[in-house]
Image: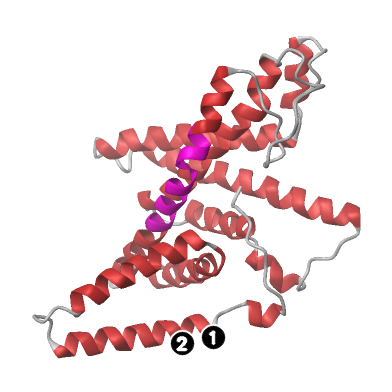
């Protein structure tokens, strides 16, 4: 979405900006970051269950649900206006990463506190806030002089800005995007392991939460090259460990059995076989 016209007064430009759904999306990501920082303060001071900690944790996921809900709504509205039908039918909806993250945000909102669950959303929000600031907020407050007629869209569809701050933000996003997505993949693997360990406590709801997150993570694996790379990296490390001469043969056999079962489960749960098409991966927003 382009910023308001530069020839309008600043107050009018800001009013036009804040009245958009995209600004509500941006405000949701800012709220998530602020709440995560406040919860982090409670966490490092061992006040996990204080009133402020609970409020910050729940509000962060409420903000996450708002941001992903806006993206899902805009996608549905755009298809309705154009008369397009969802390729693959309703089943294909569950392959949309934004719907997946929306559902998980609502689940985390009403589940017991798991601080690790906040971190993937936080990483995404850092980059969404940075990108919106560069492409919308800065050009609205300080429009580039004479740029409207000469600027050409970049590969992301955003017009380049003459603002040094916007340029620095753009370089930051470009430099650290891949590393951050790899970090998110690692965090999601760690979160699955955290849920697996919790499930063995047999506390109420732990196995159900593990099952739901496993379905989510399976879909992430099929859609994200970063998740696949992180998963294969973990498997390669375990392969190296069990290949050691000091590893008992029984351990090697157990690991090979686990790999075989995971491979079969991955093949069986590939939704692309059921929707009749290869879904186009989308970046979570």
Of residues 62 and 227, the one nearer the viewer is: 227
Residue 150 position by quadrant: top right
Relative side of 240 to 55, left or right: left
Is residue 202 in view from this perspective? no
Identity of the residue drawn at 50% across and 62% down: 225
Residue 55 position by quadrant: top left
Identity of the residue drawn at 53% across and 53% down: 105
In the rendered structure, which segment of residues is drawn in magenta? 172-187
Is residue 108 in view from this perspective? yes
Give yes or no for residue 227 being in the magenta stretch. Answer: no
Mark 1 lies on residue: 268
Q: Is residue 100 above or below residue 122?
A: below
Identity of the residue drawn at 52% across and 37% down: 173
Q: Which secondary structure dominates the residues rendered in magenta? A: helix
Residue 264 bears which disc, if any? Answer: 2
Relative side of 60 to 103, left or right: left
Identity of the residue drawn at 57% across and 65% down: 223
Residue 147 bears which disc, if any? Answer: none
Q: Residues within 10 Å of mark 2 (few under 14, many from 20)?
A: few
Q: Are marks 1 and 2 in contact (CB under 8 Å)?
A: yes
Q: Is residue 44 above or below residue 108?
A: above
Q: Is residue 68 above or below residue 13?
A: below
Relative side of 89 to 68, left or right: right
Relative side of 232 to 246, left or right: right
Of residues 8 and 196, the one nearer the viewer is: 8
Question: Considering the image in quadrants, where does the N terminus appear?
Answer: top right
Q: CA distance from mark 1 to mark 2?
A: 6 Å
Q: Residues within 10 Å of mark 1 (few under 14, many from 20)?
A: few
């Amino acid at each position: 979405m382009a910023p308001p016209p530069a020839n309008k007064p600043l107050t009018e430009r800001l009013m036009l900006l804040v009245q958009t759904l995209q600004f509500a999306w941006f405000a949701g990501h800012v709220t998530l970051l602020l709440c995560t920082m406040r919860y982090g303060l409670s966490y490092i001071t061992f006040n996990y269950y204080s009133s402020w900690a609970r409020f910050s944790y729940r509000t962060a996921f409420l903000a996450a649900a708002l941001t992903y809900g806006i993206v899902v709504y805009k996608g549905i509205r755009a298809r309705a206006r154009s008369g397009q039908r969802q390729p693959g039918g309703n089943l294909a909806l569950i392959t949309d990463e934004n719907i997946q993250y929306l559902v998980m945000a609502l689940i985390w909102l009403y589940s017991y506190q798991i601080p690790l669950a906040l971190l993937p959303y936080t990483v995404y929000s850092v980059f969404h806030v940075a990108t919106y600031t560069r492409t919308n907020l800065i050009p609205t407050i300080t429009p580039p002089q004479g740029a409207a007629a000469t600027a050409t869209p970049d590969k992301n569809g955003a017009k380049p800005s003459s603002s040094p701050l916007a340029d620095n933000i753009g370089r930051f996003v470009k430099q650290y995007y891949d590393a951050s997505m790899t970090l998110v993949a690692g965090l999601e693997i760690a979160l699955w392991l955290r849920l697996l360990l919790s499930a063995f406590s047999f506390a109420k709801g732990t196995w159900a939460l593990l099952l739901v997150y496993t379905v989510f993570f399976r879909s992430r694996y099929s859609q994200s090259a970063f998740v696949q790379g992180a998963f294969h990296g973990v498997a390669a490390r375990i392969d190296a460990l069990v290949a050691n001469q000091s590893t008992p043969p029984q351990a090697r056999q157990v690991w090979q059995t686990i790999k075989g079962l995971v491979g079969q489960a991955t093949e069986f749960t590939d939704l692309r076989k059921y929707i009749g098409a290869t879904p186009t991966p989308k970046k979570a927003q």
